[in-house]
Amino acid sequence: MKGDLLGIHLATNIFIASAILWLLLQKIGNLNPIWAISSMVASVDPQVSLAYKTLRGRIINAVLGGVTGLVVLAIGSTSAWKLPLALAITALLSTYVVKVQVMWRQAPITAAFVIASGLEQHSKLSGMELGIRRLGEVILGCLVGLMVTWLMSIIWPLRVIVKEEIIVKSN
């Protein structure tokens, strides 16, 4: 898309979405917005169709990773060995059961957030609570990224330059 403002679109979307998340989570909710912002950055895009595909894959795989992480936290001990085990299980489930290839690495990443929360808290219940909150923040970040992408596509439509190809048939 030579000659367009694709990078400016992306930077504007990220600026607006991160400001929204910062205000919502830090100022209103008194929470650290970093999980939501990092998730938003991965799902925001100047093109709504690409943002939607990414959002769908991120949410499906984030929920898979979150659920797997919570199950491993609930049934396992407080050993650090939970982390590699949960990551491997989640990667297998994501690739062979869920099969949503867009953002399939999100599943083990989310499982890592959840398991790390449990290990950090040294308590199953506190870890599960923090893990659920982080999963919610990840999903919120994805949704805000899509919302901003959609609104910006209405306010400031992306100009796509299409090259026409001429096909010459030989007789």
Image: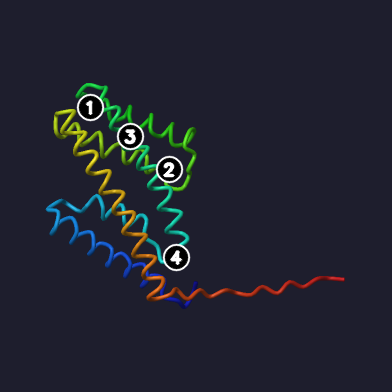
Mark 3 vs mark 1, CA separation in Å: 18 Å
Q: Residues within 10 Å of mark 2 (few under 14, many from 20)?
A: many
Mark 4 vs mark 1, CA separation in Å: 40 Å
105 or 131: nearer the viewer? 131
Q: Secondary structure at mark 1?
A: loop
Q: Secondary structure at mark 3?
A: helix
Residue at (70% x, 74% y) in the render: 166
Direction from residue 103 to residue 21 in the image, left or right: left
Looking at numbered disc 4 in the image, what kind of residue is underneath it? Gln
In the rendered structure, find residue 47 and report the number of the disc placed on it: 4
41 or 131: nearer the viewer? 131
Q: Secondary structure at mark 4?
A: loop
Looking at numbered disc 3 in the image, what kind of residue is underneath it? Val
Q: Which residue is mark 1?
A: 80
User: Which is in the foreground here, disc 3 or disc 4?
Assistant: 3
- The earlier-in-sequence mark between 4 and 1 is 4
Mark 2 vs mark 3, CA separation in Å: 15 Å
User: Which is in the foreground here, disc 4 or disc 1?
Assistant: 4
- The earlier-in-sequence mark between 2 and 3 is 3
Direction from residue 115 to residue 5 in the image, left or right: right
Whole-percent x and y of residue 144?
A: 31, 59
- The earlier-in-sequence mark between 2 and 4 is 4
Direction from residue 58 to residue 27 in the image, left or right: left
Say above or below: 6 vs 91: below
